[in-house]
């Protein structure tokens, strides 16, 4: 009689095998073969690890499970090994196999290069069962089946995790508010901050894999950009004011026409920047443009002084 795996089951404990054969007694569900304790396997240090779920099948054993057509399971996972209750014995020796649709997909012999004994640490089994119709688990005896308490601990059939998309509704609302702000209503620096935050927020909205943290960060950046107060920024104008003050009495007659013309044009421009700048960047740029024009000024030669010098030199 065919018994198919319940589509809602994940633990092997909730699935009835289509076919089951064991070398001693019957398969034990969520308990060791002796029915005296939880399923326990040895870790790498020889210590027992308990499992609340799993199945025990004394070697030689064969457990066969069929799947409904169109099932959503993708992976079978388990830990296989000899139950810890036999850990002091030298007789247990088996090798585990998993077959999917009559194809060998796991062998403890291939993984370990040797048989599993009572001293062997538990082995992780993970095989692909996507679209499979049948899974068969074997625990094979080696020399004999004395104390071959073969266990498939924490055995389960896994489905993909459901896709959970982060809620972007608040971010989308904030983004719409930011995009509604007109450029003429804010300073140049605030506008730049807004555009940077808007661009970053839109990228998060468009990213289907954006996390909740990505969304929270984008909302925070938009809030900071929209609430940024230009009045709170104190601009350092001291250097620009000093340069303008030091050059206030410069006269065109004292310098060559070419160098003074460039200087005068730049000075007039940066003087207006001093009164209209809303960002430190504007002030710094004005300094960078003005200072070189001062250094490039060339004074007009003093003809009287030059004549006196020539006379002293006897020319």
Image (tube, rainbow, N blue to C red):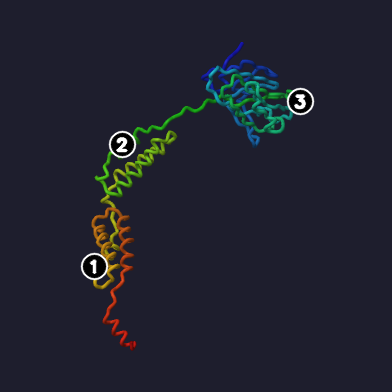
The quadrant the C terminus occupies is bottom left
For label 3, count other residues whose C-alpha is less than 10 Å away and answer few (under 14), some (14-19) or many (20+).
few
Give the percent coordinates (x, y) of residue 68: 55, 17
Residue drawn at (26%, 82%) of the image: 304
As helix, strand or loop, the secondary structure at mark 1 comes to: loop
Disc ID at residue 248: 1
Give the percent coordinates (x, y) of residue 277: 27, 55
Residue annotated with mark 3: 143
Q: CA distance from mark 1 to mark 2?
A: 49 Å
Seen from this angle, which residue lies furthest bottom?
314
Residue 34 in view in this figure: no
The mark lying in front, picked from 1 and 2, is 1
Give the percent coordinates (x, y) of residue 117: 70, 30
Residue drawn at (52%, 25%) of the image: 159
The mark lying in front, picked from 2 and 3, is 2
- Left or right of 40, for residue 304: left
Residue drawn at (29%, 44%) of the image: 227
- Left or right of 44, for residue 226: left
For label 1, count other residues whose C-alpha is less than 10 Å away and answer few (under 14), some (14-19) or many (20+).
few
Seen from this angle, which residue lies furthest top?
1
Residue 156 picture quarter: top right
Q: CA distance from mark 2 to mark 3?
A: 74 Å
Q: Sequence-wise, which precedes: disc 1 or disc 2?
A: 2
- In contact (CB < 8 Å): disc 1 and disc 3: no
């Amino acid at each position: 009689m065919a018994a198919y795996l319940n589509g809602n089951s994940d633990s092997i404990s909730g699935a009835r095998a289509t076919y089951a054969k064991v070398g001693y007694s019957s398969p034990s569900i969520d308990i060791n073969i002796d029915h005296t304790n939880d399923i326990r396997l040895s870790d790498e240090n020889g210590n027992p690890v308990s499992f609340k779920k799993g199945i025990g099948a004394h070697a030689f054993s064969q457990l066969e499970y069929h799947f409904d057509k169109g099932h959503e399971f993708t992976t079978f996972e388990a830990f296989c090994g000899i139950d810890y209750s036999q850990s002091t014995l030298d007789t247990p020796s088996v090798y585990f196999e998993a077959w999917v649709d009559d194809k060998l997909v796991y062998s403890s012999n291939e993984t370990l290069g040797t048989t599993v004994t009572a001293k062997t640490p538990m082995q992780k089994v993970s095989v692909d069962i996507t679209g499979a119709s049948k899974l068969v688990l074997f625990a094979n005896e080696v020399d004999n089946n004395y104390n071959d308490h073969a266990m498939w601990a924490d055995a389960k059939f896994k489905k993909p995790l459901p896709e959970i998309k982060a809620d972007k509704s608040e971010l989308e609302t904030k983004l719409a508010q930011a995009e509604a702000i007109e450029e003429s209503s804010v300073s140049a620096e605030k506008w730049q901050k807004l555009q940077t935050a808007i661009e970053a927020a839109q990228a998060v909205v468009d990213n289907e894999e954006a996390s909740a943290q990505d969304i929270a960060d984008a909302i925070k950046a938009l809030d900071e950009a929209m609430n940024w107060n230009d009045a709170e920024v104190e601009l350092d104008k001291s250097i620009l004011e000093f340069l303008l003050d030091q050059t206030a009495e410069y006269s065109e007659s004292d310098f060559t026409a070419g160098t003074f013309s460039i200087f005068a044009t730049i000075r007039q421009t940066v003087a207006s920047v001093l009164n209209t700048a809303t960002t430190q960047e504007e002030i710094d740029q004005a300094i960078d443009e003005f200072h070189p024009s001062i250094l490039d000024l060339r004074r007009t030669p003093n003809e009287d002084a030059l004549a006196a010098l020539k006379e002293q030199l006897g020319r």
